[in-house]
Amino acid sequence: MLDTVLFDGWKSVLRIAIMCMLAYPFLIVLLRIFGKRSLTNVNIFDFVITVTYGATLGSIITSEKVSFVDGAVVLFMLTLLQYIVSKLSVNSKGFASLIKANPSFIYYEGEFYEQSMHHHRIRKDDLRGKIRQQGLSSFEQVEAIVLEGDGSLSIIQKQGHQPKDALEGVERSAD
């Protein structure tokens, strides 16, 4: 048994090399055909697709039970489903609201949204770090902190009397 741990023969090595040469370019071509949107992490569905691409590609390359054609069909179907879901979310606000998380305020106009912070498991120390990363030294310099639908935090610096149209649609869950 221990003799096959490091090397189990050239047949499996050759199969892995051939599957890499077939599956990887296939996935690249497929993603180029379906567009840049296939790789974005905008919502949970996109995240799941991205992780699934990696797991599927790994299975195609390493599992002798998965043929190239089987793997190609899986990758194609995943990409097609992702394309359909993204098209539906662009064309239907109702569908988009089902699969996309809305942005929400964590901090706005000097007020922490404690309930939202607790719900999303965000601490004030986390916010301080994000503010420092933006080159700011105080919450007084910040107009808003928004938890985006993809889980990232946006820091909006105070700009005087500028329009705030980028903040339209952000959920306000007042405490």
Image (spheres, rainbow, N blue to C red):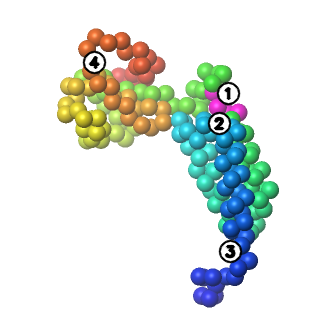
Q: Which residue lies under the disc numbered 4?
A: 159
Nearer-N-terminus badge (4/3): 3
Q: How far is the residue under mark 3 from the one under mark 1?
A: 42 Å
User: Is the stretch drawn in magenta largely helix, strand or loop?
Assistant: helix
Q: Badge 4: how crowded within 10 Å, few (<14), some, or many (20+)?
A: few
Q: Which residue lies under the disc numbered 3?
A: 13
Q: Say whether marks 4 and 3 touch (CB < 8 Å).
A: no
Q: How far is the residue under mark 4 from the one under mark 3?
A: 60 Å
**Mark 4 element type:** loop
Q: Say whether marks 2 and 4 touch (CB < 8 Å).
A: no
Question: What kind of residue is marked 1?
Answer: Leu
What percent of the width, then of the height, locates residue 74?
74, 50
Q: Which residue lies under the disc numbered 1?
A: 88
What percent of the width, then of the height, locates residue 91?
66, 22
Q: How far is the residue under mark 1 from the one under mark 4?
A: 36 Å
**Rendered image quadrant of residue 104:** top left
Q: Which residues are magenta?
A: 84-89
Question: What kind of residue is marked 3?
Answer: Val
Q: Is residue 172 above or below residue 20?
A: above
Q: Which residue lies under the disc numbered 2?
A: 35
- Residue 127 numbered mark, or none: none
Q: Nearer the viewer, residue 162 or 147?
A: 162
Question: What kind of residue is marked 2?
Answer: Gly
**Mark 2 element type:** loop
